[in-house]
Image: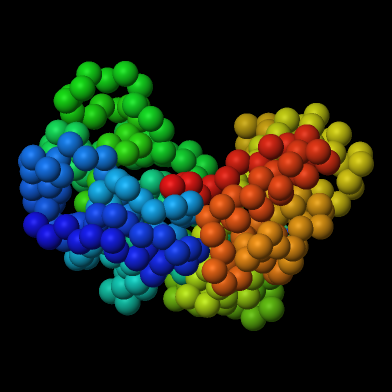
Amino acid sequence: MLVEKNVPLEPWNTFHIVAKAHFLLRVARCDDVQQVLADPEWGPRQKFVLGGGSNIVLTGDVKALVLKVEIMGRRLLQETDQSYIVEAGAGESWHDFVTWTLDQGYPGLENLALIPGTVGASPVQNIGAYGLELQDRFESLDAVDLQTGAIFSLNAAQCGFGYRDSVFKHGPTGAAPGSVPQQGMGLAGRALITTVRFRLPKPWKPIVGYADLEKKVLETEVSQPSARQIYDWICDIRRGKLPDPAVLGNAGSFFKNPTVTPEQCADIIARDPKLVHYPLPDGSVKLAAGWLIDACNWRGKSVGQAGVYEKQALVLVNRGGATGGEVMTLAKAIQTSVYERFGILLEPEPQVV
Ligand code: EPU
């Protein structure tokens, strides 16, 4: 077991914030976790699970033992008349995995192309884009309990998926120490996801209802696109409006799109008729956080080296050498002005470390 010391985390967080891990262990197999838990020096220490670093803001050096997940592998587990079940190691790059499924002839994840991060982080966030959420394709996952070392599996219901939400983002709810995690129990900081399985339904059906995709259908006159065609469109759309983290540090959307009551929505529309809003099946209304921020004139603005992306106000960027503190100061200033104008408190998406 090799614990590295004072490891720079700049290459391993997509914001490219400069910070160090006091201690870091690369996890290539389940056994590596169990070994570290059994170790008298490292076992009791606090741990931080790092995937692709695409949804974190580092506000200083990380004192907890960083477990950098590098569990690889991908395979077709089962094919039935109804679906392909595919499996991937948590350390696989999400986008490379999506590309691989298409190359192998297992379509169904194409709408989630080009999302930064790893396979293991995808259920934590319940990543979603262009009319599809991870939960729509999720089958099950395996994880290691970071308190007991027990290996356990969760199905979709046990993951408690919501909009950019899951059981992995919530704290414990009073389960007995040492017990195997149960359905509904918050697992934040407690689970290290090792393997994720996806169910890709047959026959494949395109999902092109999202406005940007409908535009592509009209522009190209391809009314029955293949999965590969949708994948190419998604890559094109994302490259057009979202910054490439390799070029400009960022963590994707910085805030969640808020949900309001129809009355709140009507109240805002009375003052701002151009408000971008989407009625939801449960009667509530989702608002575009990007629009709210844009309406407060934040696009292109900066605090120190942290800025609001010129082409998408929902994305905060590192213009070069930004600290986590600058990113959070900017985020708080945006929250305040959106709250003062619209009475809505935006909720950040990334985990602040
Ligand atoms: N808008 C503005 N000004 C802006 C940005 C957006 O007016 O500066 C308006 C747009 O004109 C559009 C609306 O806001 O009418 C929505 O914008 P967009 O279609 O870009 O989607 P979004 O709601 O901002 C969400 C996800 C993205 C995902 C896209 C596509 C969240 C928090 N974000 O963004 O996810 O890629 O939809 O499905 O749900 C992420 O989570 O990191 C992420 C990138």
The residue sitting at the bottom extreme is 220
Count of numbered marks: 0
Q: Is residue 1 left or right of residue 184?
A: left
Q: Decide if residue 73 is in sight here.
A: yes
Closer to the camera, 192 or 214?
192
Q: Position of residue 191 (x, y in %)?
A: 26, 40
Q: Position of residue 59 (x, y in %)?
A: 48, 51
Q: How is the image coloured?
A: rainbow
Q: Decide if residue 82 is in sight here.
A: no
Residue under the image location 60 percent in, 41 percent down: 347
State which quadrant residue 120 falls in: bottom left
Residue under the image location 52 percent in, 42 percent down: 163
* Above/below status of 121 relative to 94: above
State which quadrant residue 180 falls in: top left
Image quarter for ligand 1: bottom right
Closer to the camera, 75 or 151?
151
Residue under the image location 35 percent in, 72 percent down: 96
* Quadrant of the image containing the N terminus: bottom left
Closer to the camera, 304 or 266?
304
Q: Position of residue 272 (x, y in %)?
A: 89, 46
Q: Position of residue 166 (x, y in %)?
A: 41, 39
Q: Is residue 250 left or right of residue 212?
A: left
Residue under the image location 34 percent in, 26 percent down: 172
